[in-house]
Amino acid sequence: MEENEGNRAERRAARREGKLDTAAFLKVADKFIDVANRENQTVLATELHMAFLFAAARYNAHVAKTVMGVEDHEKFVDHMTKQYTEMLRQHLADGSLEAEK
């Protein structure tokens, strides 16, 4: 079996276990963006982005407490804050998100 086929088999096995490779990760993220875009037809973006941030915080707290069993909440908050900060910086630097003039 070629290396590429081995990698493909590994990715498929990981996905069956519920793990996300880069392509699957982006596909799932796009689903959330699609929900936001649909909601944005009736809800102002300035209201909607805070609702999504609230939902993300709520879901992450659920995962931390009930799935991961995180005991040091402040350490988790610090880690997640750094992750969010880096993601936000990357997206703000993305030229494809420029407003149309």
Image: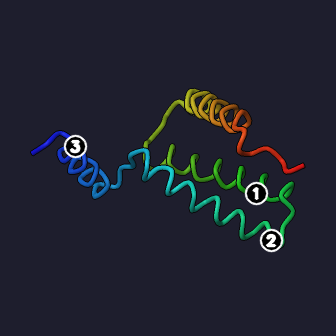
- Of labels 3 and 1, earlier in sequence is 3
Residue topped by disc 3: 4
Task: Estimate the spatial distance between the alpha carbons at disc 2 and disc 1, rounded to whole Å.
Answer: 15 Å
> What is the quadrant of residue 2 in the picture?
top left
Mark 2 or mark 1: which comes first in sequence?
Answer: 2
Could you say where residue 16 lies in the image, as x and y percent from the top left?
A: 28, 58
Question: What residue is at 65 percent from the left and 33 percent from the top?
Answer: 90
Q: Seen in the image, is 54 located left or right of residue 43? A: left
Residue 47 vs residue 96, the one in the foreground: 96
Which SS class for mark 2?
loop
Labelled pair 2, 1 in contact (Cβ < 8 Å): no
Q: Is residue 38 above or below residue 59?
A: below
Three-letter code for the amino acid on which mark 3 is drawn: Asn
SS label for mark 1: helix
Q: Which mark is residue 41?
A: 2
| Left or right of residue 50, residue 27 in this image | left
Residue placed under numbered mark 1 in the picture: 51
Label 3 or label 2, whichever lies nearer to me, is 3
Quarter holding residue 95? top right
